[in-house]
Structure formats: C-alpha cells, structure tokens
C-alpha cells in the first residue's frame, strides 16, 4: 500500500512539473513582441556600429541593449543567443541553460520569424533561420 502512495506522489510531481514548464500562448506572444525589439536593436548594432565587429554573443547583446536595459527584463531566466552573418543578425530565445528553443527572430524583419516553442518535438537551442536569405528580401 505504501508503494501506491509513493507512485501517486511521483506522478503528481511529474504532472505539476510538466504543466509548470509548458509556456502558454499568451506568455510566448508577449516574449515574441519583446524579442522583436531586441532583435531590431541587435540588427542596428551589427549593421551600423563597427565597434561590434568580432564581439562574442554576450558582449554583442550587451552593447545592443545598453541604451535600454529594460529590453532584456522579459528574458530573465532564459538563454538568449545571437547569430551574426556579415551585417545580418538573428536572436534566439531558449529555456534556461540552453534547453529547448522557444523563439527565433531575424533582426531585418518586422514580425517574429519563428515560434519554436510549440513545434511539438525536441527543438535544440540552435539557430535554424537562413538570415542571408531572409534579409535579402
């Protein structure tokens, strides 16, 4: 009988944990809106500030958002990555410590490019956008 209670307790913890980690569409839409502002800031830095050339991801993100640190507040506890290809750039938001990819956006577009959080499968924290192709339009 004690084993049944242990099993029920483990299942309850698993269910609560699974529900707590699944983001809602409302949360992701809010983050998507915030991400388009960050990716635009990164895009402007990559395109027009030569001081950004050769900077690592974290430093480029810091330089790009230094004018408005509040841009990064919605992403507290998440992993933010930056991709640069020449004068084009993209920003990727993932679960903490580089877990599942949530949102991906090229800085040269007005709308968010990819909602990856609801793809259904395991979606690693890696860039998938072809920013040269997207930004050439």
Image: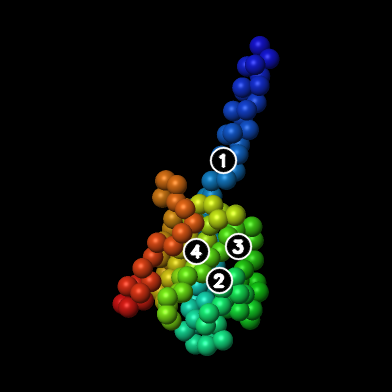
Distance, label 4 to label 3, CA atoms, is: 11 Å
Quadrant housing the C terminus:
bottom left
Q: Residue drawn 56% across and 39% down?
A: 18
Residue 73: name its quadrant.
bottom right
Of labels 1 and 3, earlier in sequence is: 1
- CB atoms of marks 3 and 2 within 8 Å: no
Position in image of residue 108 (x %, y %) = 42, 76
From the image, state whether disc 4 or disc 3 is nearer to you: 4
Provide the residue designation for mark 1: 19
Disc 1 is placed on an element classified as helix
- Residue 57 marker: 2
Q: Nearer the viewer, residue 52 or 11?
A: 52
Quickly name the residue at label 4: 92
**Of 31 and 78, the residue lying toward us:** 78
Helix, strand or loop for disc 4: strand
Task: Decide: few, some or many residues near mark 2? Use Cα within 10 Å; few <14, some 14-19, many ≥20.
Answer: some
Dot 4 and dot 2 residues touching (CB under 8 Å):
no
Give the mark, 1 or 2, whose residue is nearer the N terminus.
Answer: 1
Q: Which numbered disc, 4 or 2, marks the residue that appears first in the sequence?
A: 2
- The residue carrying mark 3 is 75
Front: mark 4 or 1: 4
């Amino acid at each position: 009988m004690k084993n049944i209670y242990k099993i029920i307790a483990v299942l309850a913890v698993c269910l609560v944990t699974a529900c707590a980690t699944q983001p809602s569409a409302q949360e992701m839409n809010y983050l998507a809106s915030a991400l388009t502002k960050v990716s635009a800031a990164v895009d402007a830095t990559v395109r027009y500030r030569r001081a950004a050339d050769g900077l690592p991801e974290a430093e480029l993100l810091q330089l790009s958002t230094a004018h408005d640190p509040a841009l990064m507040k919605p992403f507290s506890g998440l992993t933010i990555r930056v991709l640069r290809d020449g004068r084009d750039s993209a920003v990727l938001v993932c679960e903490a410590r580089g877990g599942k990819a949530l949102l991906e956006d090229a800085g040269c577009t007005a709308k968010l490019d990819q909602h990856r959080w609801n793809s259904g499968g395991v979606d690693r924290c890696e860039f998938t956008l072809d920013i040269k192709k997207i930004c050439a339009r």
